[in-house]
Amino acid sequence: MKLPRWLEWLPLGHVESIDPADLPCPAEVLAEQFHLLDVRTPAEWSQSRIHGSINVPLHRFSLSSLDLDTINKPVICICLSAHRSTLAVRKLRRAGIEAYELKGGMLNWWRLHLPTEKN
């Protein structure tokens, strides 16, 4: 079922997700297999991020903000708690891009003591 455009921007409902516990480690391998798109604010991203992730804050997110020709592998969308990433996943999937949210967001990543980097 296709959602009305205004409804797809509500952080409700379900999108395909990937559990961080099921992802390859080390993070370098993860970045080779997936594009990592972090939609948190620049301040959040600079404090703690997954190696290889790029930061496109949700308030600036649009398909035109990405170079779609370079998306040649699945995209994992990342936020703090898997609410903001839902919106990005919906938009990417509507454009025909294989996209998933990071289940539980960075809160789940940290809970599992997975590696991060910061500025």
Image (tube, rainbow, N blue to C red):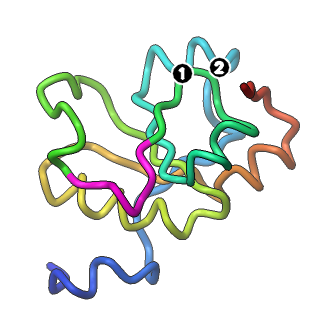
Instruction: From the viewer's perspective, tell me whether residue 50 is left or right of residue 99.
Output: right
Q: Is residue 29 above or below residue 39?
A: above
Other-residue count near label 1 (Cα within 10 Å), few / some / many at <14 / 14–19 / ≥20: some
Where are the magenta residues, as a range?
Answer: 56-62
Name the front one of labels 1 and 2.
1
Q: Which mark is residue 52?
A: 1
Quadrant location of the C terminus in the rendered image: top right
Instruction: From the viewer's perspective, tell me whether residue 42 is left or right of residue 74.
Output: right
Quadrant location of the N terminus in the rendered image: bottom left
Q: Are marks 1 and 2 in contact (CB under 8 Å)?
A: yes
Point out residue 20 in the picture as x, y percentages from the top left corner.
66, 41
Which amino acid type is marked by label 1? Gly
Q: Is residue 1 visible?
A: no
Point out residue 53 in the picture as x, y percentages from the top left corner.
52, 30
Report if residue 78 lies within the magenta region: no
Q: Name the quadrant containing residue 94.
A: bottom left
Q: Is residue 69 visible?
A: yes
Under circle 1, the secondary element is loop
Q: Which mark is residue 16?
A: none
For the point 47% across and 59% down, which residue is it? 85
Q: Label 2 belongs to which residue? A: 27
Report if residue 57 lies within the magenta region: yes
Under circle 2, the secondary element is helix
